[in-house]
Image (spheres, rainbow, N blue to C red):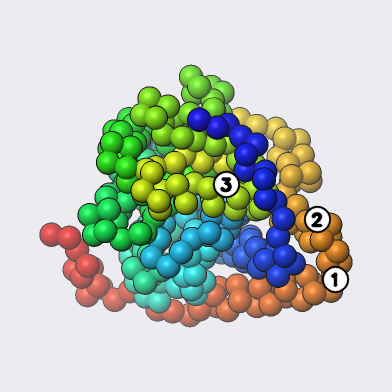
């Protein structure tokens, strides 16, 4: 079992690759900022969990995904959808509960799916996606397909009993599953140190012999390199792998959060010194890319995409009452 540094072996990338990651992370950030505003204006109801700060995790993982690989996650899920290539308009319209949303306005922030993009949710029950993600891995094995299931969950979810049942099966049958633990250090308002007997979450599969690695989840290249190793392991039939992504969320747990469990200084310090987008910009500069105007232009383009999504999400009609009885599993 490696806690480690091994993922630091190939942290170089071309400017073209870095610009792509920068763009993908920025799209998530701007989308989430806008979603936060729409929530504040009363256009989004219910729960809404923003992914701001954690962008490098999903973008780095996505960089090694192959056609057919599946993604499944919890409720902090808008970033995963965008990274999978789902349309920003359809995601935003689902947040506002409109007909043009991915679940026709009936699912909301936590319940969206795209068979086309192999995105399987969007789950509001903490940990529920983990056995489902192992099920996706089982399907891949059963159908003799070389696909890998990327199963994301949080530090809090990693304490759920079903995680261990699912991990046992995954290793027993050598299923192609990569467990991506997004350790943002808090489960709502409970820190990892208060709730985990072992705070090294990459060791969660130790009892089953599942290898794990701790990864700097604020560095998109460290994530990509770790992802490469883990996904290859799973795709080659060697079984599951655990990646513990050390990351951080800047916003509250959901939209109302008294934020008494951490200090303003802690958040500011990470925003200032460890922001994944700024770190990608720094990597570009180290590579010799210093075209700030191009980055500004990119930001403008992304803001336009997000504005279009927001406009669509307000113009799209609310679902008709006749929709109350469609898509029901009964
Ligand atoms: C089974 C279950 N228990 C409790 C909750 C309430 N709840 C929602 S999110 C959450 C914390 C989960 O934290 P973590 O897994 O670290 O994910 P993060 O919010 O940090 O992304 C809790 C306890 C729930 N939705 N489902
Ligand atoms: Mg957490």
Residue located 49% across and 35% down the image:
212
Determine whether, in the image, residue 141 is placed left or right of residue 16. left
3D distance between C-alphas at marks 3 and 2 = 20 Å
Label 3 and label 1: CA atoms lie apart by 29 Å
Residue 231 in percent (x, y) is at 47, 51
Residue bearing mark 3: 226
The picture quadrant where one finds residue 37 is bottom right
Q: Position of residue 290 (x, y in %)?
A: 86, 66
Disc 3 or disc 1, which is closer to the eye? 3
Tell me if mark 1 has few (under 14), some (14-19) or many (20+) residues whose alpha carbon lies within 10 angstroms of its own. Answer: few
User: Upstream in the sequence, badge 2 or badge 1?
Assistant: 2
Q: Tell me the element at label 2.
A: helix
Tell me the quarter of the image containing the C terminus.
bottom left
User: In the image, is 244 to the left or to the right of 238?
Assistant: right
Residue shown at 27%/53% (left/top)?
141
Extreme left residue here? 330
Q: Earlier in the sequence, mark 3 or mark 2?
A: 3
Label 2: which residue? 282
| Image position of 114 with respect to 122: above or below | below
Which residue in the structure is indicated by mark 1?
291
Counting from the top left corner in percent of width and height, residue 142 is at 22, 54
């Amino acid at each position: 079992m490696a806690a480690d540094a091994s993922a630091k072996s190939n942290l170089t990338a071309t400017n073209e690759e870095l610009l792509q990651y920068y763009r993908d992370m920025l799209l998530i950030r701007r989308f989430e900022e806008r979603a936060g505003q729409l929530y504040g204006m009363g256009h989004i109801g219910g729960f809404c969990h923003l992914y701001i700060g954690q962008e490098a995790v999903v973008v780095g993982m996505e960089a090694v995904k192959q056609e057919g690989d599946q993604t499944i996650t919890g409720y902090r899920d808008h970033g995963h959808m965008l990274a999978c290539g789902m349309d920003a308009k359809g995601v935003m319209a689902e947040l506002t509960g409109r007909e043009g949303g991915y679940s026709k306005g009936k699912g909301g922030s936590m319940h969206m799916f795209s068979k086309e993009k192999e995105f399987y949710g969007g789950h509001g029950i903490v940990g529920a996606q983990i056995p489902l993600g192992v099920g996706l891995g089982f399907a891949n094995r059963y159908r003799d397909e070389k696909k890998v299931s990327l199963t994301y969950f949080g530090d809090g979810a990693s304490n759920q009993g079903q995680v261990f049942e699912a991990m046992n099966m995954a290793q027993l049958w050598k299923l192609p599953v990569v467990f991506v633990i997004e350790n943002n250090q808090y489960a709502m308002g409970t820190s990892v140190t208060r709730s985990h007997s072992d705070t090294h979450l990459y060791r969660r599969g130790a009892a089953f012999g599942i290898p794990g690695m701790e990864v700097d989840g604020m560095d998109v290249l460290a994530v990509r390199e770790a992802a490469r190793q883990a996904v290859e392991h799973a795709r080659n039939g060697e079984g599951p792998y655990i990646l513990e992504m050390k990351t951080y969320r800047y916003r509250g747990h959901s939209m109302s959060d008294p934020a008494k469990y951490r200090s303003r200084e802690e958040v500011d310090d990470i925003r200032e010194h460890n922001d994944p987008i700024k770190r990608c910009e720094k990597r570009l500069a180290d590579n010799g890319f210093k075209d700030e105007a191009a980055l500004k232009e990119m930001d403008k383009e992304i803001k336009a995409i997000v504005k279009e999504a927001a406009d669509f999400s307000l113009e799209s009609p609310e679902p008709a009452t006749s929709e109350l009885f469609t898509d029901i599993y009964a």
